[in-house]
Image (spheres, grey):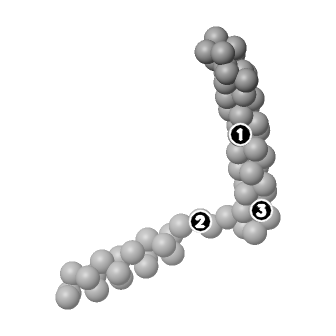
Amino acid sequence: MNKAINFLRESYFELKKSVWLSRAQMVQSTIFVFIVVAVVSVYIGGIDFILSSVLGKFIGGN
């Protein structure tokens, strides 16, 4: 039990040393992540569509 309390105490002190992002930085980072995810999704979706079409022509699908 003593080890668990010691772990929690040390974790608390380490968290106090951390530098947390401001609200504005967090919102900006979140928007950036959403934009990157959307761009990569469109890119991968486009490649998937093109490859599916090409493969469909070879196999004889619609």
Tell me the crowding category of disc 2: few under 14, some 14 to 19, or many 20 or more residues within 10 angstroms, Cα based.
Answer: few
The residue closer to the viewer here, 17 or 28, is: 28
Q: Which residue is mark 3?
A: 27
Real-space Cα separation, disc 3 to disc 1, in angstroms = 21 Å
Q: Is residue 6 left or right of residue 22?
A: left
Q: Earlier in the sequence, mark 3 or mark 1?
A: 3
Task: Name the spot of residue 8 as percent of width and height, x first.
Answer: 35, 81
Q: Is residue 2 left or right of residue 51?
A: left
Q: Read off the residue under disc 1.
A: 41
User: As shown in the figure, which amino acid type bears the numbered disc 3?
Assistant: Val
Residue 47 in view: no
Q: From the viewer's perspective, is the residue at label 3 or at label 1 nearer?
A: 1
Q: Are marks 2 and 3 in contact (CB under 8 Å)?
A: no
For the N terminus, the image quarter is bottom left
**Position in image of residue 3 (x %, y %):** 21, 81
Q: Secondary structure at mark 1?
A: helix
**How many residues crowd mark 1 within 10 Å: few (<14), some (14–19), many (20+)?**
few
Q: Is residue 9 above or below residue 28?
A: below
Please, what secondary structure does the residue beneath circle 3 have? helix
* Picture layout, residue 43 above or below residue 37: above
1 lies left or right of 49: left
Among numbered discs 2 and 3, the one appearing first in the sequence: 2
- Disc 2 marks which residue? 19
Residue 22 seen in the figure: yes
Q: Residues within 10 Å of mark 3 (few under 14, many from 20)?
A: few
Location of residue 31 in the rendering, given as x and y in whole percent from the top left corner: 78, 54
Q: Residue at x 39, y 75 (%)?
A: 11
Q: Are marks 2 and 1 in contact (CB under 8 Å)?
A: no
As helix, strand or loop, the secondary structure at mark 2 comes to: loop
Check the image and report above or below for 51 versus 30.
Answer: above
Q: Amino acid at mark 1?
A: Ser
